[in-house]
Image (cartoon, rainbow, N blue to C red):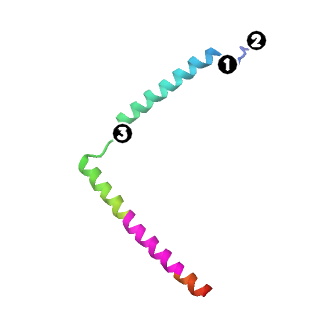
Amino acid sequence: MAKENKVPAKGSTKNKGKKKGRIRQFFRDVKSELKKATWPTKKELVKYTGVVLAFIAIFSVVVGLLDYGLAALLGLITG
């Protein structure tokens, strides 16, 4: 006869131990994967940060101009 898989009750202590082990294993795996990652050097990080900040500044100006222009257009339409 086939072996039956019994699901433990929600308050079961057996399940808590397994859950704790899975959480530990998850963080071990995360740590292992982070060690495998290629991290940028300080010089590259500063360069990338500058690029991101420049993009945000330019994009903010573009969105601001569009907002101003559309508000002026709406003002002309509604009179």
Which residue position holds label 1? Answer: 11
Q: What's the residue type where badge 1 is placed?
A: Gly
Q: Which mark is residue 1?
A: 2
Q: Could you give the CA–CA distance between mark 2 and mark 3, rounded to whole angstroms? A: 48 Å
Q: Secondary structure at mark 1?
A: loop
Q: What's the residue type where badge 2 is placed?
A: Met
Q: Residue at x 52, y 21 (%)?
A: 21
Which of 23 and 11 lies nearest the eye of the viewer?
A: 11
Please give left or right for residue 71 compared with residue 62 in the image: right
Q: Residue at x 39, y 63 (%)?
A: 56
Q: Secondary structure at mark 3?
A: loop
Mark 3 or 1, nearer chain start:
1
Relative to 32, say whether 57 is above or below: below
| Image-quadrant location for residue 9 | top right
Q: Nearer the viewer, mark 2 or mark 1?
A: 1
Q: Quadrant of the C terminus?
A: bottom right
Stretch in magenta: 56-71
Q: Position of residue 20 (x, y in %)?
A: 53, 21
Q: Residue furthest left?
A: 43
